[in-house]
């Protein structure tokens, strides 16, 4: 299998867009340090720092591995870097002699690294470009959409196999292990990245019955017990029983890009109340599908979803219960699982063509369990295109 | 299976040690924000911030989930926190009225969070306490050692089952998936944490033949191709063949604590050169076992290992080749896979009783493959105790 490298044309468009934003912000350039942003702008995550001047070609300064960075990145200027002073020299060589204002990723860059950069560039004023990068990454190219569709394909094949795999008496952990194994066999990249501070994301949340109603630290409606308070999320030791909802929230990554799909399974039958609640989740997706198009505010879709859930008598359980409740119904998808846009109470930006997001209506019934539905969508000029196509009802085994 | 909670006595000793260090540094207190440090001092990773004053009880301020934090943490003072101003109020309530000097984890805390804290506490001077925390965490209690031994047990059972599982023609990814599945079935926590900026660690590095000789960004002698430059490490699409080294570097986590063990497998026979190289790896472990004891400098063990490899004619390949070479032969183990001490060229601190570390001599032959051996050790008053006991020769399948 040939490894997929980001095409040079992709990088050129991304860097062009970013340089436009730097200019508007009055910055001479930016120093990109974080793995994911590095990959977005250079096509590699080899240990390096990328200097993007406001004008002219960027320079990738590599610590390890230079050979691999040169193979993976379509950028023209790739130089070795051994000391912080190399960084200064290379920025001068390829940018302007004495930059005054540079951008950094304040949302993820650790303080210690920031202070080191302040020492290297004592005359520079640094400012935050996280939002600028996240906004740029929010709108996907057709090349990026293709990768997300491949990741959706991985999840759908797992869901198909899961129908044969889930059996009464298996622990959540056993099924979780099998899901990871199925994902890797299909070339899943083996890791879901999340940008938020202290946020970590499992590739699968396989939770049955009351286990799925346990909240946790993550910014998600579903937490799960995990095996330890040290990693308090996902599968635990509970065994799958008949007549309880089995929630399967799956992520997968291909060529860096993520998809995120949830389905609810049951062996036997659920209480009628769960079926009623599930129909509300389907109504929420249908509402988003019919209202979603460029120009619609994300907060509007969130509000409509909450209104729907409330009007059907499920407001209390929608998107989590009690302190576990979250105030969004969807999130952007790309190289990270928590990209923009967020279909959230306080996110008042409009949908734009090229955005890709997951809509994940869920209901949590404390002490009983959770049901969920999640699909991935692309915003096109005339509305939403659904990227995931797996049967969307409760799946009876 | 009952979840394991950190006992109150453990927390008291850790916090007492930390407060002594704060006093020496002249700090009024510290604000602990990172998941892993939070867990170490409070027993929970629920979304929260922990204020540890120089004297008196610490206060855990929880955003989500308060209920779960109260269940998991043996600390006495646990309060809800909704806004940054709650933080200020709670620090005043439980600490001193106007702290002047506070410590923060500069090595991991993002700049944006730092700046928010600067706004909340405009009169406070902040300084870095990362090293202080890492040094404290470096010496393990018997409770911590027990958890690491459980994690070793998980790995050894996987190695045992792997002997039946590895077959010619399977791809690295297929075996990697099976390894993940085996780990989870045994209660592995599902994630290996690494502290270093931009460092990410897979639970298994399953690499065969030339695949194992591909360097990457990680601070490890072995990188691996991965499936994409976006996540450039670990297993790829190569199929296992006869007569090539199959490297299996496994991590596992139980109750937060990690173990790390490597073995080399082969179907058939290796070239004589690989056997010669492997004997050097065994000699390195034997040397560390006989010289390692409290007081010995970590850099001494590193230097001796390099000297050994060079004297046997393998200096060039030891701990990586060319730009892939790393300058350590072992690393501390605990809640993170890159803890102190480091058996490294430039780490001149002495071993201390209670330290736990992995020794991982490896040889990389470019274009051909890699062989490796890795075991976990505890420093006792009279020398090293080996925690991992799996057969330590090349394993013929």
Image (spheres, coloured by chain):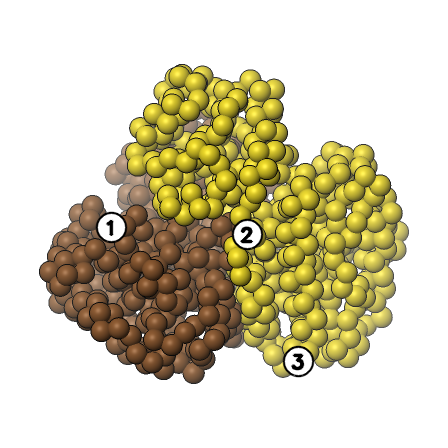
Chain colours: A yellow, B brown
Q: Earlier in the sequence, mark 2 or mark 3?
A: 2
Viewer-proximal residue among A383 and B315: B315
Residue A167: image tag: 3
Residue B32: quarter of image: top left
- Tag 1 residue: B327
Q: Is residue A162 something one can see in this rendering? A: yes
Within 10 Å of disc 1 (Cα), the crowding (few <14, some 14-19, many 20+) is many
Q: Do dots 1 and 2 share one subunit?
A: no
Which percent across, then down, holds residue A240? 65, 76
Q: Where is A82 relative to B241, above or below?
A: above
Chain at tag 3: A
Tell me which residue sits at (85%, 61%) in the image.
Answer: A279
Q: Which of A23 and A206 is in front in this view?
A: A23
Q: Mark 2 points at which residue?
A: A4
User: What is the CA distance from the residue labelled 2 to the residue labelled 3?
Assistant: 37 Å
On screen, residue A251 versus residue B367, left or right, reads right
The answer to whether one can see residue B8 in this image is: no
In the rendered image, which quarter contains the C terminus of chain B?
bottom left
């Amino acid at each position: 299998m040939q490894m997929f490298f980001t095409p040079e044309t992709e990088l050129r468009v991304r860097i062009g867009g970013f340089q436009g934003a730097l200019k508007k912000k009055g910055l001479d350039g930016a120093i990109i340090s974080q793995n994911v942003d590095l990959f977005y702008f250079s096509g590699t995550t080899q240990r390096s720092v990328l200097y993007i001047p406001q004008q002219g070609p960027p320079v990738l300064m590599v610590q390890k591995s230079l050979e691999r960075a040169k193979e993976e990145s379509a950028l023209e200027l790739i130089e070795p870097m051994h000391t912080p002073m190399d960084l200064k020299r290379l920025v001068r060589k390829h940018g302007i002699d004495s930059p005054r204002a540079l951008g950094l990723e304040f949302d993820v860059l650790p303080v210690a690294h920031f202070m080191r950069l302040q020492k290297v560039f004592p005359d520079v004023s640094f400012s935050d470009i996280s939002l600028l990068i996240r906004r740029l990454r929010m709108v996907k190219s057709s090349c990026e959409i293709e990768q997300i569709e491949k990741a959706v394909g991985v999840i759908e094949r797992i869901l198909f196999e899961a129908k044969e795999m889930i059996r009464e008496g298996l622990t959540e952990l056993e099924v979780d292990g099998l899901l990871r194994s199925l994902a890797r066999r299909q070339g899943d990249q083996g890791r879901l990245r999340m940008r938020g501070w202290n946020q970590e994301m499992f590739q699968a949340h396989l939770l049955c019955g009351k286990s799925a109603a346990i909240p946790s630290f993550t910014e998600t409606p579903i937490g799960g017990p995990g095996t330890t308070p040290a990693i308090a999320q996902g599968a635990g030791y509970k065994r799958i029983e008949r007549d309880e909802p089995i929630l399967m929230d799956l992520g997968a990554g291909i060529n860096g890009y993520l998809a995120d799909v949830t389905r609810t399974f049951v062996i036997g039958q659920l209480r009628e109340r769960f079926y009623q609640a599930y129909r509300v989740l389907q109504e929420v997706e249908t509402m988003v599908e019919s209202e979603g198009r460029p120009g619609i505010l994300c907060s509007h879709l969130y509000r409509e979803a909450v209104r729907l859930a409330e009007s059907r008598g499920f407001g209390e359980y929608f998107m989590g219960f009690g302190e576990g409740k979250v105030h969004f119904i969807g999130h952007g998808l790309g190289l990270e699982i928590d990209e923009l846009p967020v279909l959230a109470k306080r996110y008042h930006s409009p949908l734009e063509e090229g955005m890709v997001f997951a809509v994940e209506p869920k209901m949590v019934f404390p002490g009983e369990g959770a049901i969920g539905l999640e699909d991935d969508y692309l915003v096109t000029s005339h509305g939403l295109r659904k990227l995931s196509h797996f049967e969307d009802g409760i799946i009876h085994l």
